[in-house]
Amino acid sequence: MSNELLDDPMDTGAPSGGAAESINQEELLPPAYENDRDMPLEVSKSQVARLEDKRDREAFDEQYDLDVTEQAIDVESLACNYEGNAFFLRCRFVAKHCSALRADAYISLINYLRENTKDITHYVTFFNELELELSKNDFKNKVVNLQIPVRDAKWIEEIGIAWQTALDSYQGEYKRHKDEGVKESTRRAMEDLFQHFVVAGKIEEAIKLYSRGIRDYCTHLKHSINMWLNWIEVSIWANDWSKLDSITSTAYRSLKDADDAEKNNQQQQRGENATYMVERDAGVPAPSVTNRQLIETALAKCIAAQTLIKLRQKKYIQVVEMVLQIKTESLQPKWFVTSSDLGIYAVLCAMGTMERSCLKKLSGNGTFRKLLESEPLFIELLHSYTSSRFGKCFSIMDSVKNRLLLDPFISHNVRELFARIRQKCVIQYLQPYSTIKIETMAAALNTTVPVLQVSLLDLVENKCVLLKIDQSAGIIRMTDETDEDTTLRRVSDTCDRSIIRAKSLLWKSTLAAANIHSITDKETRQKRKNQKDPSRLDIGRNLIDLDDGPSGTISDDFNTAGYEPQQFLDDLGDI
């Protein structure tokens, strides 16, 4: 079959500025071997390992060499909590980064591919990886919880031939409908070809197909929603985060416009049918899913995908804000991230960035508590932090760390978030004290003295706290570099105020001795009126307006008429 079926240069969605990309049909299937058990490991891995390694390096740079030696999760529970591509992505991550569960993860992946897909490339690769793991010397000390499958060479051959035949048929149908110019038929042909690539694990080819102008062929709302969701899912599966960012932004705007239009239509329909009550025939089934429900589901998935992008970009405040916007009842239960996953992400991001007062308000949020209904341990973690039970907080963090490291979406953020939370706990613990024993603090934080000392040194180097550690006495002394400057500034300000007060008192005492009195503002205004009216001017009184003294306006608080010397001393205050 010619490559021109997918690379039509007249396609409006084709990239400009160069020849169209071609699909190498020889790479769609692995090479045929008479005995698949004799297939070299390097040959089968070359089909997908290079792309997988590249994706993992791009998505998990810090954690690519991660090796969790503890059985932190249950592989069988992954199959219960996730399905489809979500299960494949998470289980493959566990197989790559958890040596204790590697064999079980590969067995689960092989069984999933055999029963639900036509992905013979990954099937052969995972079988070779499983055999390599079983042949290691240190594997004798490990326990396999699942039954080891047998390589099905006949299934590999039959699926390979059938898939290639179907591919030729789908490509021919797509080319024919595209030449005819019928949008709906072309969209259906593209959708069939897209799903054909996905079921065989050819994610790169599926993304290239959707990039060739699939939006131009979507004529109905349901078609557009389905297109956006498929595009988002394959982008997450391929770890193509830059593409996912642009897709989710465009999809969110489109879905919000559709949601507003649907709300207006419903309001108009309520107004037109308000006076009528029509009983639905019992024999007519109710509509399965309305447009509004489709839009809400798509919006929930779109916001969840944007949350993963913000988490990857380490914009933790935005992660919390987006999680609180998601309607949990509209989110698909077994998608790439569940509602409990989003709640866990939001808890850790909030604890690592927000103040305690904000966290207390967040813990009382109904949406937030609903997200963590199935994760009471993280609710306790948040309460322990806000109630200053830092030892309990650290214990919970240690117990869930390996589990979170095996989550492909937050694995590369775990160490950073935990470090932030620990630093905030240490800083908050030190705030009420000027001196504290290291052993007492280490016991309260459920850690050891050497680890605590390292944490304190890091805080000092980052200028988060100012303290001195007396190792001989085992005491931490808090210091404040602003003490001397602040004291000198306060003394200087007090002296300046005292000098001004003393001069004012001396000035007014001199005036009082000369029988010259200052008058209030009210009396001043009345005097000025009298000056304007000569008939009301009282010349007999010896009153002079001296509100404006040598240093500006003199407050009437310093009126010293009738003052005794002791009162003068009392007014001087702290001079």
Image (tube, rainbow, N blue to C red):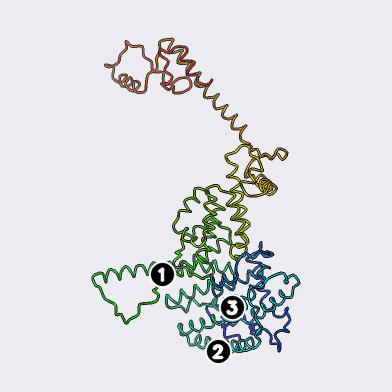
Quarter the C terminus occupies: top right
Give the CA separation, mark 1 to mark 2: 35 Å
Q: Do callouts 1 and 3 mark residues in contact (Cβ within 8 Å)?
A: no
Query: Can you name the residue that lies furthest to the right here?
Result: 137
Q: Which mark is residue 169?
A: 2
Quarter the N terminus occupies: bottom right
Q: Dot 2: few (<14), some (14–19), or many (≥20) neighbours within 10 Å?
A: few
Determine whether, in the image, residue 12 is placed left or right of residue 295: right
Q: Closest to the observer: 279 or 542?
A: 279
In the picture of the structure, the residue carrying the numbered disc 3 is: 112
Which residue shows up at 60% across the image and 38% down it?
Answer: 433
Label 3's element? helix
Q: Closest to the observer: 395 or 546?
A: 395
- Residue 49's x, y, as percent? 68, 75
Q: Do callouts 1 and 2 mark residues in contact (Cβ within 8 Å)?
A: no
Q: Residue 52 is drawn in which quadrant?
A: bottom right
Q: Dot 3: few (<14), some (14–19), or many (≥20) neighbours within 10 Å?
A: some
Query: Can you name the residue that lies furthest to the left here?
Result: 275
Q: Which mark is residue 258?
A: 1
Q: Amino acid at mark 1?
A: Ala
Which residue shows up at 62% across the image and 89% down it?
Answer: 158
Residue depth check, mark 1 versus mark 3: number of the one nearer the observer? 3
Label 2's element? helix
Determine whether, in the image, residue 357 is placed left or right of residue 259: right
Give the CA separation, mark 1 to mark 3: 36 Å
